[in-house]
Amino acid sequence: MRSEGLMIPCLEFSGMELKEGTEEWREMSNKVRDACESHGCFLIVYDNKVPKGLREDMFLCMKELFDLPEETKRKHKSTKPYRGYNCGCPVTPFSQSFGIDDAPLPQTSLAFTNLMWPQGNPTFCEMLNSTSSKLLDLSLVIMKMLVEAYGLPKEYTSDIEELKSSSNFRLMKYKVPESGEMCETALLPHTDKSALTILCENEVEGLEVLSKSQEWVPVKIPEEGFVVIMGDVLKAWSNGRVHAATHRVMMKEEKERYSFALFAVPKEEVKIEVPPELVEEKIHPLRYRAFNYGDYFAYFVSTLHDNALDLFAGNAFFHE
Ligand SMILES: O=C(O)CCC(=O)C(=O)O
Ligand SMILES: [Fe+2]
């Protein structure tokens, strides 16, 4: 049996009014903080915001998208890494993905849909826009809860909003392993470069998170829920209190896996800076210098280093 410490907490948001300042809000904020610090991720069920059935509809739409001819899919191009249509790239040979910037903006969802279906596809467009918007809203709720749980003044709410001033919505399809081995690493271990990521998968499980005791823990996303994974940005902002969970995807089933994820990210020009209230000389000395998100992302892309955040902005590597 797994020990308690390895179990990823599941937070039940359904039925919550989510009003700031209420006792319910404060209690949930503390649970979010505990999960972010001890696991770097948590499961969330929240059917007021993300109603039942939305996931299934989203997976149907995704199948329709990935079933389009390759030449159509390749029309979605981007000069930015992890955006555009990716297929058969050397680091992820088993997957295809679409990365769409700012899908919560209606004009972006419409432009993407019309590129894929010149004759239009209102169902897909509505699904892309509303799902990404709901997940981006949820990411703000979670970040506001961290401001509450750290006892920070209200002014930080607007600062933290900056950490999700943009987003990358990623739709992924993983092929069934062909090598005959029934367990293949379909996505290598990494931390996300986002503030946080909200993800879900079809019925084919595969996501695993590395616990602080260095064990791989399979993530069982509840049927109507999501997993929230903390990224490098919130780790830096919180002065290392929030743990950015390392995760990977293992393909163990003979079935295609679909997943979609909203990466809440700062705009490139946003400065990430630890609030002075989270620095304390003895127990929590400053771990990360202030840095610009675009510079950090460019550094990561050019080095692809596992430890990019510490190398780029970590205290031990401060440059004058
Ligand atoms: O497909 C998944 O479950 C994980 C995807 C992921 O970790 C990523 O794209 O950063
Ligand atoms: Fe990831």
Image (spheres, rainbow, N blue to C red):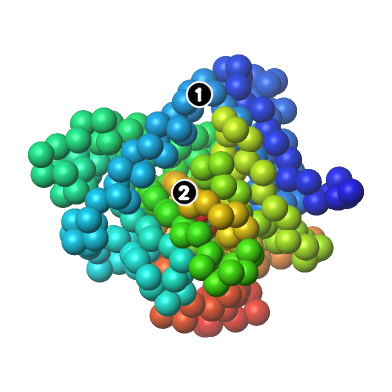
Q: Position of residue 149 (x, y in %)?
A: 68, 38
Residue for point 43% across, 62% down: 95
From the viewer's side, name the closer residue of 291 and 10: 10
- Residue 87 visible in image: yes
The residue positioned 36% from the left and 44% from the top of the image is 63
Q: Which mark is residue 91?
A: none
Residue 286 placed where, x, y %?
A: 66, 65
Dividing the picture into quadrants, the one containing residue 111 is top left
The disc label shown at residue 258, or none: 2
Under 8 Å from ligand 1: the CB of mark 2?
A: no
At mark 1, the secondary structure is loop
Q: Is residue 166 left or right of residue 28?
A: left
Alpha carbon distance from label 1 to label 2: 18 Å
First of labels 1, 2 by sequence position? 1
Task: Name the residue type under label 1.
Answer: Lys
Q: Residue 140 placed where, x, y %? A: 49, 38
SS for tag 2? Answer: strand
The answer to whether any part of residue 151 appears in the image is no
Judging by the rendered image, the residue that carries numbered circle 1 is 52
**The furthest residue to the front:** 180
Q: Residues within 10 Å of mark 1 (few under 14, many from 20)?
A: some
Q: Residue at x 42, y 39 (%)?
A: 59
